[in-house]
Amino acid sequence: MPPDVLETLVSLCKRRGFIFQSSEIYGGTGSVWDYGPLGVELKNNVKARWWQSMVRERGDIEGLDAAILMHPKVWEASGHVSGFSDPLIDCKACKSRFRADKMDEARCPRKPSKHPGEYADCQLTEPRQFNLMFKTFMGPVEESASVVYLRPETAQGIFVNFLNVQQATRQKVPFGIAQIGKAFRNEITPGNFIFRTREFEQMEMQFFVEPGTDMEHFEAWKARRMEWHLSLGLDPSRLEFHQHAPDELAHYAKAAFDIQFDFGGTLGFQEIEGVHNRGDFDLRRHQEFSTKKLEYVDQVKNTRYLPFVIETSVGADRVTLAILANALREELVPGETEGRTVLGFHPALAPIKAGVFPLTKKDGQPEMAEKLAVDLRKKFPVFYDEAGAIGRRYRRQDEAGTPFGITIDSDSTKNDDVTIRFRDDMGQIRVSSSRVAGVIGEYLAADIPTADSRLVP
Amino acid sequence: MPPDVLETLVSLCKRRGFIFQSSEIYGGTGSVWDYGPLGVELKNNVKARWWQSMVRERGDIEGLDAAILMHPKVWEASGHVSGFSDPLIDCKACKSRFRADKMDEARCPRKPSKHPGEYADCQLTEPRQFNLMFKTFMGPVEESASVVYLRPETAQGIFVNFLNVQQATRQKVPFGIAQIGKAFRNEITPGNFIFRTREFEQMEMQFFVEPGTDMEHFEAWKARRMEWHLSLGLDPSRLEFHQHAPDELAHYAKAAFDIQFDFGGTLGFQEIEGVHNRGDFDLRRHQEFSTKKLEYVDQVKNTRYLPFVIETSVGADRVTLAILANALREELVPGETEGRTVLGFHPALAPIKAGVFPLTKKDGQPEMAEKLAVDLRKKFPVFYDEAGAIGRRYRRQDEAGTPFGITIDSDSTKNDDVTIRFRDDMGQIRVSSSRVAGVIGEYLAADIPTADSRLVP
């Protein structure tokens, strides 16, 4: 990847409808992004895959969808009201506000000096803590009694529902609760496209275990979560673990590893998932602040205790960005002068599974192609395109990451055979139109997007 | 349905893990609810079904997932800053606040009078407008320049992205953009469980059409949307259209129909979806406020215009509540003294598709049953249960709305046959364990949850 991989992606994502700047016609909203037609399918595929592997295929993890607005005491118990803050410095002269740890790189916005870190006419205060939670008011009166926060993480929705879920489902420890949802952080320095944004989506799972067994579960989840990222087709050489040193550990964490992905360019290796041993910090705090017993009763061993929690926390937007960066390639096509841009997505993640193309706009080809597209759409997302040269239509779908192209030509309307063209190796096979859904279905199930495979009929 | 249908549902939903009060251990958050393990699957099934029919099966509707935080000018253009408000009356003596249109039913909370509508010691102000949008601040400074709102509807995310989507996808009018997402309204009088909440989820589609063709599209969408609700298994006699009279029409609407569902009890018929002809109100306002041209260029007719918009707007939580109310029944079981509670969900919507039950905990039955559960979970959600009498286990799944029960008995471990029991008619069939996935798959595809059907092998 070239160093400007993010710039390339921002531009490609806008042009092809993966991701747009939020409220772009009004000049944009700072570090907030909208997912377009291809982006929403890509991200939904990521979320569905996570849900399938974490909830639906397991008997010991339950799903949850807790609300964004929670009781304000939740954030006192979690430590976010007192501890989730950045130090800021105000200027009494120009009314600007700076991050204390970035003063060396900034300058006064009203009277900019030549060099960063110089604030000649500024009257700077001592650093003060600025809380990163978005604050709002519930009910008609804007007063402290009605303050609520947009949740800065989904995890607390799981902790406060721990006993409700356990009792409704009769799960026994060890078991987990999983959730996908939006969270909000009023970051002072967001950036890097959808990597660090003020509004983002998390996929979190908290696994409740008996104290003393926590480190073995921690190691097992580390391994499982790395397996999951590999199953998305992310390049193994671009994935690594990063262990938090003792001075990096969050206040709640006994042990923590990040799974990092190499985004390339100046961004390099960055966290896309965290695996944490939170001990019983959260349940203990909520028990204290709510004065409700949150102990698990083990009826076999006849004991009761606060379980320890192994947490796996993925940024859905970050994984989506990793998948985009991993998939992007520009390559020469043998025998052609122009190169092509390809998003080589894992077929299961591709927003569109197949393009359907009549070779020409006459002789019944569009009608046959449209009928095929309507049939296929019952099974998977399909894009119908009859505009322009066929080579150009292929290239457009290469750039959208569509793994299969189906072309209807003058023979097709006679003998009912169509061509399936493969995105990655550009190989082609010829099959009966009635078998297209089945053949592509087999390729999708097998995650094989090339023609030279055992599946070629 | 008895008049206390909502009370019955609130209690059942908590007990079985469909829906919990948000932050319950802290006394709850006003009119905010969390979806538990069964609720999140049910609601996800509703959303997936809407997305399948509105986006994936159509070539003329594109998906979108715009952010909750948008540029504040969006809400000036949409009319929400000036017009989205309720009139409130303050009391200067007791500092209470009342909805002006509900004064007849309320009383002073500090010194309650015997009769509502009497405010002996109150000093009431004139009514003032209170905006229903949740306000927050982006960036570190809480000042007017940094005010942003939580979106009160998803629609505006579609309007501001209209040209971005059209250009990226090369769609031609008529075409639509569809979106599922959270919205927030600081309601003064929320209530009725998940019917009117401060945080809720919408499934909205805006269909852009040529002016003059709008009423024919409006009629077509009215019919299609009613069909969709019927496809969920909602009782036709509990669904009806309600036309907005001229004095009911919103400021943006040329014509509007609600689709109402009869929730029973005191709630009765209530809106679950709105179909609106919004004309070009929204695009015109955004064009004016952003000073960006938002016209669609028709290259065939060589014209340019602001399209009219036909909107279909469903409350995901309201449809989910309708599905719960529609499914709930208490019935006598022939030959038994105790009745049973059933959630007779359409099989495609049921959170769990099959329960798997070893008849006893010995003779290899649990092992065979667990192995079957693991296999089936790759296809659909399955609940494994070995605790208690088999009749009680069936009843638990009836109450969870699980359409199929699979029982492994002492014969099963010898001849590999298992029993499939049907939730609705309690009929039973016997099939080989290797065929269970296929047989249930056929029933699911055909939406038939009774034994006496053409599918019985």
Image (tube, coloured by chain):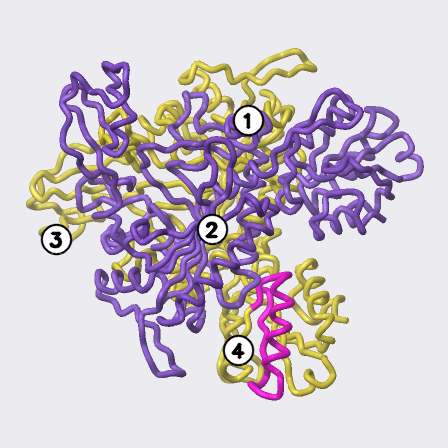
Chain colours: A yellow, B purple
Q: Are marks 4 and 2 on the same chain?
A: no
Separation of marks 3 and 4 at Cα, in angstroms: 50 Å
Q: Secondary structure at mark 3?
A: loop
The 10 Å Cα crowd at callout 4, few under 14, some 14 to 19, many 20 or more, is some
Residue flagged by tag 1: what amino acid is it? Answer: Thr
Image quarter hosting the C terminus of chain A: bottom right
Residue flagged by tag 3: what amino acid is it? Answer: Pro
The residue under the point 29% across, 35% down is A135
Mark 2 belongs to which subunit?
A: B
Q: Are marks 3 and 1 on the same chain?
A: no
Mark 3 belongs to which subunit?
A: A
Task: Please state which of the two labelled residues, at mark 4 or mark 2, is closer to the viewer.
Answer: 2
Determine if residue B222 is in view.
yes
Q: Position of residue B55 (x, y in %)?
A: 52, 60
Name the mark on residue B241: 2
Separation of marks 2 and 1 at Cα, in angstroms: 27 Å
Separation of marks 3 and 2 at Cα, in angstroms: 62 Å
Mark 4 belongs to which subunit?
A: A
**Disc 1: which residue:** B8
Tell me whether the residue at label 4 lies in contact with that at label 1, contact meaning CB atoms closer than 8 angstroms.
Answer: no
Q: A63 or A324: which is nearer to us?
A: A63
Q: Is residue A128 left or right of residue A194?
A: left
Separation of marks 3 and 1 at Cα, in angstroms: 65 Å
Q: Is residue A315 left or right of residue B101?
A: right
Task: Please state which of the two labelled residues, at mark 2 or mark 1, is closer to the viewer.
Answer: 2
The residue under the point 22% across, 37% down is B87
